Image: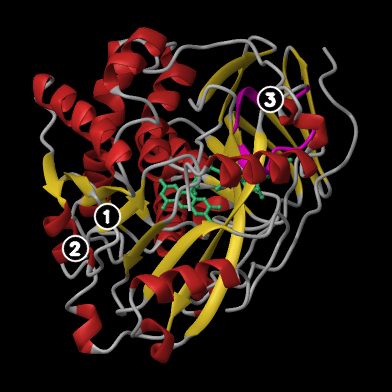
Amino acid sequence: MRIFDVVRTRAGQAFPRSLYAETHPAPERVALAGDLRVDIAVVGGGILGLSTALALAERGVSCCVLEANAPGWGASGRNGGQVNSGLKWPPSQVERDLGSEAVTFSHAAPTRLKELVARLGIDCDYANGGGYRAALDPAAMRELEVLGAEFERRNIPVRMMDADGMAAAAGTPAYAGGLYDPVAGQVNPLKYVRGLAAAASAAGARVFSDTPVTAAVRDGDWRLTTPHGTVRADKVLFATNGYSDATVPGLRGSLLPVFSTIVATRPLPEALRARILAGREVLYETGLQTTYYRVDAGGRLLFGGRGPQAPASGPGAAKRLTRLAEALWPGVAEVGWDHGWNGRIAMTGDHYPHVHEVAETGLVCAGFNGRGVALTTALGPRLAARLVAGEDLPLPVTPIRRVPFQPFWPAGVAAVLAWHDLTGRSR
Ligand SMILES: Cc1cc2nc3c(=O)[nH]c(=O)nc-3n(C[C@H](O)[C@H](O)[C@H](O)COP(=O)(O)OP(=O)(O)OC[C@H]3O[C@@H](n4cnc5c(N)ncnc54)[C@H](O)[C@@H]3O)c2cc1C
């Protein structure tokens, strides 16, 4: 069966500029040259592809990762580093929509990441400071209270925060209140994903950079074409998320790639470090246009949210974000900004990650809606078990469905963002 034969992926791109890339030496990039036979091939070297490959290799399965650029080049190596639990919607709705395992699985995901980092000894500045969802106004706070009550009924340990508590934690009086989740944490995402790549290789997975899959054909087994070699595999996982191209028919049209931007200050002076999330907690504001921030291991404020809907880098990448942060903490303007970058998250129509089966022995998993660090980590071993032993997944397997208006991206995204500004549900 022919799946796809058009080459679209731009491969071999330099690592995008970011605080992470500029402060961590890039490992050697090894491209596939020649032909290879494996049991399972993974397309995409982000956290999802690498955590799956690691789990496969640890089960003794022969596998490879084919990455168009370099491990962590996509969202996995440039994200906000927030290790958050749960899915977009409250547990009762997740249970109705996806089943009860999706609830327990997604709330345990940060703990899976913590365990993995400890087991493999990945040096990625991991901290388990917990995380806040912060309410911008009393209406948002009422929604958080309903959510908090639901968590309590389900024995999911969270703590409600009043406005004073949030002001003390975040160092700004901007919030009407919040909800604290103790399992949340933070990582340097590029160090984390490179650590995963090293661990997967050490366990026996072959990890290739600069190796875009330009055609995927299933004819008995799979034949994956790349510029300098071919891979034959019994099964394939497509883990390309917001960077999905036309390799899997319909996949790109089922995802809305939205750019999220991060700006980083120079290291904060001690007084500001002691004021802003001093316990190395992470924070995101509730609402449809999430603003999120944390202070990293080097004492820099990393402030993320909506920015330009095209690749951008440098401290001027999103003036809107720097202005917003300087309004929250006036002292930040004096410290100054020295990094900015962005990357693509993959939104879905229902805000849930999606799993699809293609040509019987191919699996696709994508659509992490900007909260994939913990989820992709935890999904890896489950996808591996599915591929090897047909085990159940914590998410339902669904057909690929086109997102309405997707063809109008990026103009459509800009229109949706403008609409949210008008309705005032976000900053
Ligand atoms: C700026 C930003 C901030 C974010 N902040 C957070 C956060 O704080 N917390 C959180 O939980 N989530 C966050 N996210 C989301 C999170 O980063 C993603 O959900 C997660 O990294 C997705 O991982 P992935 O492995 O599925 O995809 P990706 O990391 O995007 O990897 C996909 C890879 O596939 C490769 N690829 C594509 N096509 C091909 C092909 N044909 N052949 C070979 N390779 C191919 C790409 O080169 C890419 O490297 C953020 C995302 C961005 C962009």
Where does residue 298 sit, x and y in percent of width and height? 31, 79
Taking depth in this image into account, of 117 and 284 the one nearest to the observer is: 284
Q: Is residue 247 visible?
A: no
At horizontal 32% and vertical 38% (from top left) the residue drawn is 140
At horizontal 46% and vertical 87% (from top left) the residue drawn is 336
Amino acid type at circle 3 is Ser
**Earlier residue among tags 3 and 1:** 1
Residue 86 versus residue 415 in the image, above or below: above
Q: Nearer the viewer, mark 3 or mark 1?
A: 1
Where does residue 26 sit, x and y in percent of width and height? 55, 72
Is 4 one of the magenta-colored residues?
Answer: no
11 sits to left or right of 173: right
Is 237 one of the magenta-colored residues?
Answer: yes
Residue 175 - label: 1
Residue underneath mark 2: 167
CA separation, marks 3 and 2?
40 Å
Magenta region, residue range: 233-249
Count neighbours of disc 1 (C-alpha within 10 A) and say few if under 14, some if 14 to 19, many if 20 or more: many
76 sits to left or right of 294: right
Amino acid type at circle 1 is Tyr
Secondary structure under badge 1?
loop
Taking depth in this image into account, of 362 and 293 the one nearest to the observer is: 293
Secondary structure under badge 3?
helix
357 sits to left or right of 80: right
Residue 254 - label: 3
The furthest residue to the right: 6
Where does residue 234 sit, x and y in percent of width and height? 62, 20
CA separation, marks 1 and 2?
7 Å
Asked if the residue under mark 2 is in contact with the one under mark 1, i.e. CB atoms within 8 Å, the reply is yes
